[in-house]
Image (cartoon, rainbow, N blue to C red):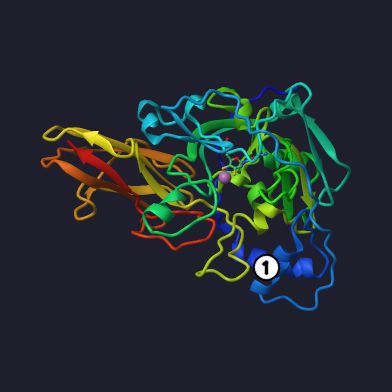
Amino acid sequence: MTTPTDAPDTAGTPDTAVDEAAYDRRRLCQWLAGRARADGVARRDLLRLLAAAGLATGLSTAFPAPARAAAPAAPGIVKPLPEDRFTVRGTNAETNFAALADTGHSTPVSHFFVRNHTSTPQLAPSEWELRVWGSGLAGRERTFTLADLKRLPAVTRSSFVECAGNGRSFYTSQQGQSAEGTAWTLGAIGSARWRGARLADVLRLAGIRRDAVDILPRGLDAEYVTADGTNLGHVRRPLPVPKALDDVILAYEMNGEPLPPDHGAPVRVVVPSWIGIASIKWVGDIEVSREPLFSPWNTDFYRLFGDAYPPGGSAPLTRQTLKSAFELPWNASLPVHTGHRLTGRSWSGAGTVARVDISTDAGHTWHPAQLHDTPRRADWVRWSARWHPTAKGPTELLARATDSTGRTQPRTTVHNTQGYLFDAVVRHAVTVV
Ligand SMILES: Nc1nc2c(c(=O)[nH]1)N[C@H]1C(S)=C(S)[C@@H](COP(=O)(O)O)O[C@H]1N2
Ligand SMILES: [Mo]
């Protein structure tokens, strides 16, 4: 028996290994040829995707009608959600960014946002098992207990988990456009130190074949039933094998403590840099497949739909975008003729944060903020800027990040109907009093 050791984070190949559009086209061709599976995906969704990819021909494959199921279970988040730290939105809790001013680089569990499709299940760690199975394994399925995972070399990585819809409400409030889904401001993000086993190690122990293409981690939380009564089954989203073997963690610790119930105890997937839905909580099994896989979470959801996109939507979303937020309440009052230290955070899923510029005059002039963390991939940086307001009245504070790929947050962002990946500069209203 080996003791857990914290291996350095050496898996650093960029996500660009996965060309999303080509991947998607290939998947659709394979599906047409009967070589891909799409459990729980409505037939119309695949037809729409096929039409968008220009692949629709005489299609006769019968898809079963989605099962009807009972109303959703009562929402439930286990940890306390004090009003100064969280804004509850349906089954979810958004972190109030102002409350992060008192925290360090990592977001304490007491402040970390929760995004639940249904409710937090309470699972006994001693009874938990991870089943790894499917056509992509050389031999039979394998199960791993928590003790098995802890015997593998442990890695620790600081990484954000951010919902793809974070910032969605600004499509409406700043751009006058409607967007379906939870009306997050900027607090559907947190960064933690995740510790666990490498998914790559587990897949290799399970005997992953060289021709495996997708894996499908699935949550043990209740099946998700949409507002119109369609049961989409357990939360699950395919992940291409190159990413799965790169830097993904099966995390059993968060900030040095056992993973708490709301964040996926006893074990969750953490997919650095990618949209939050990739990081499946309460993972119970992982299918490894030689056939491409679909789930509603990569067909209907988590693609970009709208005027700027093909009828079937964009390719499935992968990496997060670029954002910045002030650690200030909305409409904060700040005394005039006083020196203020404005603080906030910026992050990018595409690279590291290279610089952050601040405007205290609604975007006329910009000044560099001081960065307080070494910028790292898949993580945020804290920053600060001085401000000495000389005139009373309402104004807007703006923070604009540039990342190592050379991208700068734009003034406006292209709309999509589900309001994903908002990356424009947020105009933070304040009043000088
Ligand atoms: N099993 C399961 N995993 C899940 C979800 C879920 O509802 N069930 N929500 C996903 C979404 S949409 C996001 S943004 C992140 C949120 O992680 P957190 O609640 O730990 O902040 O978990 C993802 N993993
Ligand atoms: Mo999400």
Is residue 1 at all visible to an observer of this figure? yes
Instruction: Give the left or right position of residue 261, taking residue 189 as reference.
Output: right
Q: Position of residue 278 (x, y in %)?
A: 62, 46
Residue at the spot x=74%, y=57% of the render? 41
Question: Closest to the observer: 337 or 342?
Answer: 337
Q: Is residue 259 above or below residue 313?
A: above
| Whether the residue under disc 1 has CB within 8 Å of ligand 1 | no
User: How many badges with numbers are in the image?
Assistant: 1
Q: Position of residue 107 (x, y in %)?
A: 46, 30
Instruction: Give the left or right position of residue 421, taking residue 397 as reference.
Output: right
Q: Quadrant of residue 72?
A: top right
Q: Position of residue 227 (x, y in %)?
A: 66, 48
Quarter of the rendering occupied by the C terminus: top left
Q: Amino acid at mark 1?
A: Leu
Q: Position of residue 267 (x, y in %)?
A: 67, 31
Residue at the spot x=74%, y=70% of the render? 29
Q: Residue furthest right?
A: 140
Question: Closest to the observer: 336 or 52?
Answer: 336
Q: Is residue 341 above or below residue 185?
A: above
Instruction: Give the left or right position of residue 357, taking residue 120 as reference.
Output: left
* Image-quarter location of ligand 1: top right
Residue designated by label 1: 49
